[in-house]
RNA sequence: GGGCCUGUAGCUCAGGUGGUUAGAGCGCUACACUGAUAAUGUAGAGGUCCGUGGUUCGAGUCCACGCAGGCCCA
């Protein structure tokens, strides 16, 4: 029976499937964890994906990275529990549900109850769980899928509440009012994290206006201010300048009304607004419509000279009138002269800087009042001007006879493109455009143009966002900035720059974390307040809530608990129905907000265990994480929220090591997107290549933190080159091992020290490989590990060891030499299966099992083994040196043969190697036989100094002498280059030489120069890397005959094969030679030929029946062979 | 506009602390091998190291300023 399975063809995808089935039926993953019970833990946190979309190829990348280090640490003896998780809340879920139901946010509560809506969300959110689980299994990502944490789970939410209360108790949770990104289309504020979604910032062309603000009490004097959001101009209540900037007053004409006027702007910005020739033109002779408008600078002044200047309201709508100090010039430290006019228009409701500055300077903003007497901006939450402004715009349109694409009523003025009208309509006019025309007509616009800039968009609705005043709850992260920074310094970031740069800078410029989301499907904020906002309760657990509810029932505020007789559900609408009792007896209502979903995921270290309500020991044993990995886009997402909560609540890091991987782009370096059709389907790729080649390609091609240009051909190459070579090597082993009935047995194996040199060499290399891969995995550098494994497998094991050892496997019966070869190759293969197991878990296990099946005691799977320890005593540096010399010399000889057109089959007499050090000669002599057979030469001669024919060259050792001589190095170099035979001889003999340099004597030692021999007069030489080889190209008759004999063997072997003879079949050869040299060769090398070709006889005949004519280089030869 | 990353052969990538012939694989060309054979091996061609300045005796490597691409943020 065959002990080692042989494979004609290998279907890698099938290996994936088979091994997956094996893992399942033998519970290998479970065993790999259970086996390490009691061992030190290595903690990994799974960043929860959302299962409401299908997984992509980049998820394979991310998950492969996670898997590699968890598997490696398991092999290293740690217990690595990997709890899976699902991110289930948030806007994407809501939007998907709305799309499917054909509703908008406004319909919630009317067309559909919050209860039914949330129920639908809950059903939707796990929709693609099956695909995710499927992919996870197929790529071999080992994670506990049976007991994942789920962020909507009541227990999970309870922990979130607990954490929020801890923040509240520390006074780190507060309600504020800020200008925030708001999506009218989605009806919600957006977190900075959401705005960080790739693709949110897009280049768009907006109408930009440089408006003229007329200075009060002056004739025709205007301040210029530029904006890309004309719709905010009706809300203008101040202008900001930079105090230290230079400004000018310029006399000129308005380009639209042609009226003479004087304008104020930053001096540096003049070139944008005035044609250079305008300064030469006469102001008096200007005629309306002239192409170049003349101008004169009439006054230069500093920004601070402008402070306090009053101007007329741009849109004098009576309802929007404001008292002093509105409509005046103030200072803003953010004003620059990079664009615009160096004057910034401020609208308190629509800009964060604006809001801050105006608040600080006590300048009121433009607001109206709602029926509860609360301030409201003049644009409503749908992005439409209130009728107060609409009426004004409508009247102005009539006054100036402005025709739009449709009749516009006072309630029709949407900002941006929220009207959803057809923008391609020729007569389409946006509100921005209408405002521009009005201003142009009224001598209030100095320049109107389309301006292309990057503007944030809502990541789901694709509509531009507005900056809009919203009330919010915040976490006061700024209070912990120093601790956040300090703890970050202790984290090992891969790559380092993401930690210090991207993440570090983010922490340095920290703002408070805006927690609030006005939505339905998410974790509700556990805060109850009275109507005045004077009484507040924060609830930190279900039990606490139930006690409060009892009190409320007792007080008569509630009839019964919504949780009565069922499991508590902490979602809306149930918690909204709960009314609590304040200390002073007031009714408390829940703050309607949900919290940022990033809080959900950032709290997973605690919430996944329902800590502190349960599993305290579990939590403590697994906190903080040793390792996490996600995409670099999570830097300010999950990485940030994990870090923040850990620092603020536990004064700890949340993770010690983190890999922030790059993007997976298409092969041309473009982003993959389903829309563009360049997205790669992971399932199809798996089907074609199987999981191992895919993982190996992704991790070996480039460091994970570099973007990967994903190219299927790259996967194919990895498969062919690496897996193919490894597979061939295994097949080779299996083929002969089975023929010889070899079975690897530890107890009877030949000690390494008794094995042939070649074996000891490859085993020495193998030991180095163990160290190299181990070091790389330890440093979270998977790419160098894969490259080292590939290089060993392909270059050393297959291309050198197997090739040179081939004959040992097929020749003769079992003997010690043969056994050593089998054992050595076996040991290399088995070791490779372990070293590659973290990256290519399926193939590695398959290989391991093929090798070990016939052994009883070995663990079932490579993933249940221990990481190998290096055996230092097997490392033989000298032998590795020798072998490297053999490889280099062989390569040089091949190169010479090529040049001289002498094929390897033609034996040659000798090669010459100049050696200047006895050491080198010893190294080479060690592997002399090997070189001789590899390049087919009879002998190797060494020439040393005593021969007297060596031509040596000398050059300085720059690294050493450069440090010593510095600027004089050029002179030293020139001097040394001039040295001839005598000087070289002397420094070699004495170990030093003196030289004159700048009038002084300098002593140069032998170590400070490099002496090489690169030429042997009269010989064909090749040299590389300080090594020189000469080839004796003389062909004697004997050599020629031997070459012919070898050629003949080769042809006979081909014939044997053509005739379908088996390896052990014997033959009889008859040959009719036409050439004397050939018949001489056949006669002289008859024994050799017969041995090689398994011939019992080689007869020379004059005539042959029906012979085969062999074409040899210069001769032809007729032969017949017959099976005996 | 700011932060970070990347730029080396046609393609994908290596090139501690600066040191004088810049490497590998794939692809290409040629050859060899034919008992690993739908394999395998060898050799060759192929480079303004993104550009420009600078530091230095010496720069792919260090510095400055640019250019191009990417990510993140304003």
Image (cartoon, rainbow, N blue to C red):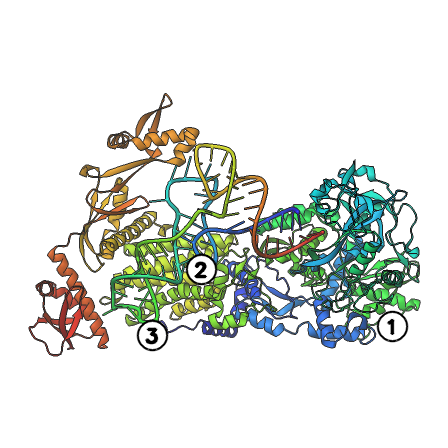
- Image quadrant holding the C terminus of chain A, namely bottom left
Q: Are marks 2 and 3 on the same chain?
A: yes
Query: Which residue is more in the foreground, B11 or A913?
Result: B11
Looking at marks 1 and 3 on the same chain, the residue that comes earlier in the sequence is marked by 3
Pointer 2 with pointer 3, Cβ within 8 A: no
Q: Position of residue A461 (x, y in %)?
A: 71, 66
Q: Position of residue A345 (x, y in %)?
A: 80, 49
Query: Residue most toward the bottom?
Result: A1106
Which residue, given by chain and number where applicable, does mark 3 sit on? A2
User: Can residue A925 be seen at all in this image of the molecule?
Assistant: yes
Judge if badges 1 and 2 mark residues of a common chain: yes
Left or right, A983 with respect to A3, comes to left
The label number, if any, that marks residue A835 in the structure image: 2
Q: Is residue A820 visible?
A: no
Which chain hosts label 1?
Answer: A
- For residue A560, the mark is 1
Relative to the observer, which residue lies in front, A720 or A1116?
Answer: A1116
Q: Is residue A169 left or right of residue A1011?
A: right
Q: Nearer the viewer, mark 1 or mark 2?
A: 2
Q: Secondary structure at mark 2?
A: helix
- The chain letter under disc 3 is A
């Amino acid at each position: 029976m065959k002990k080692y399975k042989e494979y004609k063809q290998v279907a890698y995808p099938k290996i994936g499937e088979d091994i997956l089935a094996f893992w399942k039926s033998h519970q290998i993953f479970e065993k790999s964890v259970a086996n390490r019970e009691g061992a030190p833990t290595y903690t990994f946190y799974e960043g929860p994906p959302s299962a409401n979309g299908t997984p992509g190829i980049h998820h394979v990348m991310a998950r492969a990275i996670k898997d590699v280090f968890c598997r490696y640490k398991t092999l290293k003896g740690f217990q690595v529990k990997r709890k899976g998780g699902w991110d289930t809340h948030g806007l994407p879920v809501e939007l998907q549900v709305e799309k499917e139901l054909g509703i908008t946010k406004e319909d919630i509560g009317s067309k559909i109850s919050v209860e039914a809506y949330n129920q639908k969300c809950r059903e939707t959110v796990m929709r693609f769980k099956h695909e995710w689980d499927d992919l996870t299994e197929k790529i071999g990502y080992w994670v506990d899928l049976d007991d994942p944490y789920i962020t909507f789970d009541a227990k999970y939410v309870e922990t979130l509440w607990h954490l929020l209360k801890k923040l509240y108790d520390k006074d780190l949770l507060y309600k504020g009012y800020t200008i925030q990104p708001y999506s009218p289309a989605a009806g919600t504020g957006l977190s900075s994290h959401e705005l960080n979604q790739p693709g949110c910032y897009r280049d768009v062309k907006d109408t930009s206006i440089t408006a003229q603000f007329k200075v009060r009490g002056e004739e025709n004097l205007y301040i210029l201010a530029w904006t890309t959001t004309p719709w905010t101009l009706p809300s203008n209540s101040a202008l900001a300048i930079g105090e230290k900037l230079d400004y000018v007053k310029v006399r000129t004409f308005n380009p639209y009304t042609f009226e003479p006027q004087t304008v104020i702007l930053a001096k540096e910005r003049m070139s944008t607004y005035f044609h250079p020739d305008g300064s030469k033109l006469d102001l008096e002779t200007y005629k309306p419509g002239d192409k170049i408008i003349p101008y004169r600078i009439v006054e230069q002044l500093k920004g601070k000279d402008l402070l306090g200047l009053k101007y007329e309201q741009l849109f004098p709508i009576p309802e929007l009138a404001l008292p002093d100090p509105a409509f005046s010039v103030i200072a803003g430290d953010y004003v620059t002269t990079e664009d615009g006019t160096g004057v910034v228009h401020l609208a308190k409701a629509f800009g964060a800087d604006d809001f801050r500055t105006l608040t600080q300077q006590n300048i009121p903003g433009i607001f109206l009042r709602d029926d509860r007497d609360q301030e409201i901006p003049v644009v409503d939450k749908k992005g439409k001007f209130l009728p107060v402004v609409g009426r004004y715009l409508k009247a102005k349109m009539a006054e100036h006879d402005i025709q739009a694409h449709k009749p516009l009523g006072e309630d029709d003025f949407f900002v941006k493109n929220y009207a959803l009208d057809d923008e391609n309509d020729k007569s389409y006019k946006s509100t921005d455009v209408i405002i521009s025309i009005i201003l142009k007509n009224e001598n209030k616009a100095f320049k109107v143009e389309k301006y292309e800039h990057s503007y944030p968009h809502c990541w789901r609705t694709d509509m531009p966002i507005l900056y809009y005043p919203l009330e919010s709850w915040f976490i006061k992260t700024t209070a912990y900035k120093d601790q956040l920074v300090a703890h970050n310094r202790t984290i090992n970031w891969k790559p380092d720059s993401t930690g210090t740069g991207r993440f570090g800078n983010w922490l340095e410029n920290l703002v408070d974390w805006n927690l609030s989301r006005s939505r339905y499907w998410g974790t509700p904020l556990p805060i109850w307040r009275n109507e005045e906002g004077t009484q507040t309760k924060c609830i930190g657990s279900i039990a606490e809530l139930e006690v409060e509810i009892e009190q409320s029932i007792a007080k008569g505020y509630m009839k019964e608990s919504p949780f009565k007789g069922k499991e508590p559900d902490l979602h809306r609408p149930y918690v909204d129905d709960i009314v609590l009792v304040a200390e002073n007896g007031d009714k408390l209502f829940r703050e309607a907000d949900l919290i940022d979903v990033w809080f959900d995921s950032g709290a997973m270290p605690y919430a996944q265990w329902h800590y502190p309500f349960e599993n305290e020991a579990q939590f403590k044993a697994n906190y903080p994480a040793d390792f996490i990995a996600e995409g670099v886009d999570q830097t300010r997402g999950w990485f940030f929220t994990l870090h923040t909560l850990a620092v603020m609540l536990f004064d700890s890091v949340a993770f010690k090591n983190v890999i922030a991987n790059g993007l997976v782009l298409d092969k041309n370096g473009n982003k993959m997107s389903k829309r563009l059709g360049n997205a790669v389907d992971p399932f199809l790729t798996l089907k074609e290549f199987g999981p191992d080649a895919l993982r190996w390609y992704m991790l070996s091609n480039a460091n994970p933190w570099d973007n990967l240009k994903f190219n299927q051909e790259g996967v194919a190459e990895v498969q062919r080159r690496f897996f193919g070579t490894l597979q061939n090597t295994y097949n080779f082993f299996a083929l002969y091992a089975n023929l010889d009935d070899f079975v690897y047995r530890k107890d009877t194996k030949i000690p390494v020290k008794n094995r042939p040199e070649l074996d000891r060499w490859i085993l020495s290399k193998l030991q180095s490989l163990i160290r190299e891969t181990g070091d790389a995995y330890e440093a979270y550098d998977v790419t160098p590990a894969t490259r080292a494994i590939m290089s060993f497998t392909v270059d050393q094991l297959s291309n050198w060891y197997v090739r040179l050892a081939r004959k040992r496997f097929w020749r003769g019966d079992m003997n010690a030499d043969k056994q050593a070869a089998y054992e050595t190759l076996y040991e290399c293969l088995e070791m490779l299966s372990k070293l590659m197991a973290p990256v290519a878990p399926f193939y590695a296990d398959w290989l391991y099992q093929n090798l070990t099946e016939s052994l009883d005691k070995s663990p079932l799977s490579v993933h249940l083994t221990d990481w190998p320890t290096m055996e230092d005593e097997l490392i033989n540096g000298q032998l590795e040196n020798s072998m490297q010399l053999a490889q280099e010399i062989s390569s040089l000889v091949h190169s010479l043969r090529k040049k001289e057109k002498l094929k390897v089959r033609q034996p040659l007499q000798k090669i010459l190697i100049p050696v200047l050090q006895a050491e080198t000669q010893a190294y080479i002599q060690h592997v002399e036989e090997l070189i001789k057979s590899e390049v087919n030469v009879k002998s190797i001669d060494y020439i040393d100094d005593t021969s007297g024919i060596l031509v040596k060259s000398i050059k300085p050792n720059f690294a050493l002498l450069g440090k010593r001589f510095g600027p004089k190095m050029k002179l030293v170099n020139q001097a040394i280059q001039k040295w001839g035979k005598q000087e070289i001889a002397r420094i070699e003999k004495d170990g030093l030489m003196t030289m004159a340099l700048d009038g002084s004597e300098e002593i140069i030692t032998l170590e400070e120069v490099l002496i090489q021999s690169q030429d042997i007069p009269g010989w064909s030489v090749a040299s590389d890397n300080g090594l020189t080889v000469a080839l004796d190209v003389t062909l004697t008759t004997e050599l020629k005959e031997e070459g012919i004999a070898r050629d003949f063997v080769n042809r006979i072997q081909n014939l044997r094969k053509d005739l379908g003879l088996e390896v052990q079949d014997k033959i009889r050869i008859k040959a009719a030679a036409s050439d004397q040299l050939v018949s001489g060769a056949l006669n002289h090398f008859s024994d050799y030929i017969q041995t090689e070709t398994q011939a019992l006889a080689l007869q020379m005949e004059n005539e042959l029946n029906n012979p085969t004519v062999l074409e040899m280089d210069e001769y032809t030869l007729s032969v017949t062979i017959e099976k005996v």
